[in-house]
Image (cartoon, helix red, strand yellow):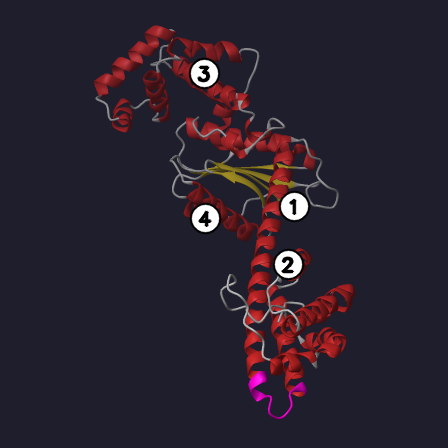
Amino acid sequence: MTADAAGAAHPSATTDPRAPAPEVPEAVRSLAARCVPRVNELARLMSQDTFAQLHGYAELPADVRDVEIAATARHGLRLFLERVVHDPQPGPDDTGFFRERAAQRAEEGMPLELLLTTHCAGARVLWQALREAARPGEEAALVELAGYLLGAEQRVVSAVTETYLDEQTALATERREERRAQVRGLLAGTEVPPAGSGLDGPSLVLAVQLPDGPRAPVAVRRVARRLQTVLDRAFDREVLTLFDGAGGQAIVPGRTQLPAGLAERLAEAGGPGVRLAAVPAEQGGEIPEAARTAARIVRVARACGHPAGLHRLDDVLLEYQLSRPSAGSDRIAALLDPVADRPELLETLRTHLEQAQDRRATARLLTLHPNTVDNRLARISALTGLDLSTPRGAALALAALLLRDAGEGEEDRSCGAGADYTPDSVRTDC
């Protein structure tokens, strides 16, 4: 039968829909006709007695149990019996009404198991009614009606299951998009944290950066789900996240401290090279600034060659300060303008500073000869006027790199700096 109904379909339900329906024997029509006057009675029996014995049915709203399910049961009973008695030809879509009801049940949160169990229970009620109506000598007609009933049940259950799952998928997608929009607004500061949501009080804002490398869309979704699972388990709650192929950010309401070992667990989910920073926000209005700070800590740690893992502000305190805009920031960043169109020189400079000015380590990472590294560094000094062999020259070069990276990040409105923030804008090439 149907999820909240007794059944529907036509005698030709299991045949080729393009073929004409076979003629229903008179004995079968007569037996089905005897049950037509009992449609209302059988519908009440289903909705008030049979279904009431099913686990979870009593928790459904009264109007759903007593009105909608009863009405669907009547529709299913009448449609099945009258098809057999009067019109064996199938209609355009005998399952349309049941699809509509299935979508409603999915939206209301009725479990699919309960929905399908009511179908089966309804079929048993109708089958019992047909058995009671059968007279001696009508055994063959009863058997044929059983075939019609099974065919009807198969069609409707299939349609209801498909519709229910489609509706659940659509609802889940809608909820995800609403959630992403909420997180995006919180990070950008364009959405006020709802009162009583926990977001108006203390929160912990995370920045997560994944290792470089191309990822197919399916792989991106898989990694995002794994990261979500790790965070949910670590904080023992559903964490608000905004992840993409480069990483992203997360907000944990009501928490101000990281659980031990979180960075290692994220690395297991996202691969070696995952970077993590966390900044507390005392109230909802501080979430955007905390997001920007966490993202900048990750960028600075990477730019300075710190190993992947958990990064704290104290770990990059000097470098973080050097990367902050100030009255002299533009002039410091401009020191590298003479080599801005020479990516190989910038890459060498960056790697050299990351490797604590170890020319052999720099050469090894760049697969160059140490003399080539020396030549490139000398060329940088000649073009920029920076003496990289002195502490002051190296500090200026580091500050210039950090400020240029920070400037690119601000232009991209990364980490909630603007209303159009998206996780794709989180810089990962600093």
Task: Identify residue for label 1.
Answer: 254
Q: Which residues are magenta?
A: 133-142
Whether residue 29 is visible here, answered yes or no, is yes
Task: Identify residue for label 3.
Answer: 400
Q: Are marks 3 and 1 in contact (CB under 8 Å)?
A: no
Whether residue 261 is visible here, answered yes or no, is no
Task: Identify residue for label 2.
Answer: 96
Q: Earlier in the sequence, mark 3 or mark 2?
A: 2
Q: Residue at x 41, y 13 (%)?
A: 392
Assess whether residue 282 is covered by the magenta stretch. Answer: no
Task: Identify residue for label 4.
Answer: 265
Q: Amino acid at mark 4?
A: Arg
Residue 192, image x and y in percent?
71, 35
Q: Amino acid at mark 3?
A: Ala
Q: Residue at x 43, y 14 (%)?
A: 396
Q: How many marks?
A: 4
